[in-house]
Amino acid sequence: MDDIANILKDNIAIAIGAIALLGAIGWWLFAASGGPVMDKQVARAFPLVEKTVLTENTRLFRFSVGAGKKLGLPVGRHVRLIAPAGPSKAEIFRSYTPVSTADIVGHFDLLIKIYPTPGGAMGRYLDSLEIGQTIDVKGPFGLFDYQVGKFKELGMLAGGTGITPMYQVISAILDNPKDTTRVRLIFANVKETDILMKSRLEELAKSFPEQFSVYFVLNEPPPGWEGGSGFISEAHIKEHVGLPETDKQVLLCGPQPMNRAMRVNLTNLGYEKSDIFAF
């Protein structure tokens, strides 16, 4: 009986090993064919290939997914980054939306703000990476489901790094000649130097004046500032996003207090709960 048990044990081990090998081969063939390289259950390690300092506390990190491959992230979805937190500490998990579009081949880009201690552990970890070092990633995650033609117009209320999912959606729309969805963005920040991708957003507004507009709001505006001041108000929304309409949705992405305040403002302007989506 012991011999039979040992034989069965050995056969099971061989079978498990074969399954794992076949799975790895299948994954390699799929990824090598140019298919998406994401997995919700198994973390994939992607090497850092470029880091750009945009502002004093903002970086653009570019990670390679391999030649001819795509990240395979649907528009508006996010990835989960996993980093070690040190000996005897739990791993760090943070979610980010790449600013690169889904059709980009070979890499994906993350726009991340580096916060001082005690928060911002993931940002500081990423900032410490050397070129060639890797970060573990799972995904895609998220409930946003963008479909061309689903809405005639999208309003967007973004705060700080909350611009990242908005920018991905904006890029997907404006890069597609068949997508006529209008987009009206209000982007809130503390100072003018905090505005991420300001020149790019202004460039898009000039290139697509009938389809995209952006209005900046600052808590601490400089002298001569021509945008909005304070927090995003009902008046700002009414003028730069507009009132509820058929086939219109408003997207929110910012700190939780901001999102809650924006829901109140939108409700006061007549928007229904179903008209609002928060990333």
Image (cartoon, rainbow, N blue to C red):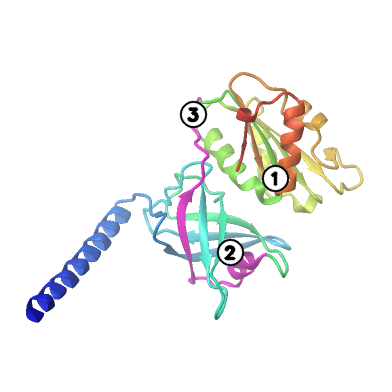
Question: Going by the image, does 169 lie left or right of 7?
Answer: right
Above or below, 226 relative to 59: above
Q: Is residue 48 magenta?
A: no
Residue 154 in sight here: no
Measuring from the top left, give residue 100's x and y in whole percent. Answer: 53, 49
User: Quick one: quadrant of the C terminus?
Assistant: top right
Snapshot quadrant of residue 19: bottom left
- Compare marks 1 and 2 and give the one earlier in the sequence: 2
Say which amino acid is labelled 3.
Val
Above or below, 251 relative to 180: below
Q: Residue at x 36, y 53 (%)?
A: 68
Q: Which residue is mark 1?
A: 199
Q: Is residue 135 magenta?
A: yes
Secondary structure at badge 3 equals loop
User: Quick one: quadrant of the N terminus?
Assistant: bottom left
- Compare marks 3 and 2 and give the one earlier in the sequence: 2
Measuring from the top left, give residue 72's x and y in whole percent. Answer: 42, 48
Q: Magenta region: which residues?
A: 120-149
Measuring from the top left, give residue 4's x and y in whole percent. Answer: 7, 76
Secondary structure at badge 1 equals helix
Query: Marks 1 and 2: CB-CB under 8 Å?
Result: no
Secondary structure at badge 2 equals strand
Question: Foreground residue, 36 or 210?
Answer: 36
Q: Which residue is mark 3?
A: 148
